[in-house]
Image (cartoon, rainbow, N blue to C red):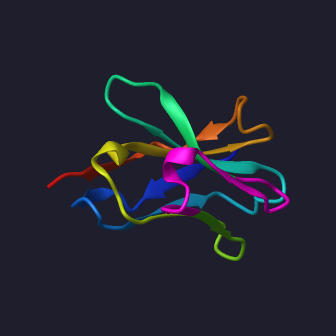
Amino acid sequence: QVQLEESGGGWVQPGGSLRLSCATSGSIFSFYSMGWYRQAPGKQRDLVATIYTDGNIKYVDSVKGRFTISRDNAKNTLYLQMNSLKLEDTAVYYCKAAKNIWGQGYWGQGTQVTVSS
């Protein structure tokens, strides 16, 4: 059973930065692709960044150049560095571990990110 726990959310002004963390229950990065999703009120949960088992990374266009996904194998922790935050980045952010990032997997409980002036 994979367990995930996000942290690092909060309130930030437009243009600010936050770093989200997702602590995992073990050394899973060799076996699972890891993704950061977000869900704004009234909207579906969308994938924003993925890091695959081989280290390849993909971003949705709306966060390219602003967000950076990374992982620390020694700490079993996934990160999402978010810079130049915009109002539309406001959402609950979730990390996910899955064999196929688009399929069934394990989710964390989410962390709220609010971008507001």
Q: Position of residue 9 (x, y in %)?
A: 35, 57
Is residue 39 found left or right of 74 in the rendered image? left
Is residue 38 found left or right of 42 in the rendered image? right
Q: Position of residue 116 (x, y in %)?
A: 19, 52
Q: Position of residue 74 (x, y in %)?
A: 70, 77
Is residue 24 found left or right of 27 in the rendered image? left
Is residue 20 magenta-colored?
no
Q: Is residue 95 visible?
A: no
Q: Residue at x 46, y 25 (%)?
A: 44
Q: Residue at x 40, y 25 (%)?
A: 43
Query: Residue 85, located in which quarter of the rendered image?
Result: bottom left
Is residue 12 found left or right of 42 in the rendered image? left
Query: Residue 117, located in which quarter of the rendered image?
Result: bottom left
Q: Residue at x 25, y 59 (%)?
A: 14
Q: Is residue 83 visible?
A: yes
Q: Position of residue 97 (x, y in %)?
A: 68, 45
Name the quadrant of the N terminus. top right
Start-end of magenta stretch: 51-68
Is residue 65 magenta-colored?
yes
The answer to which of 1 and 6 lies nearer the viewer is 6
Q: Residue at x 83, y 59 (%)?
A: 30
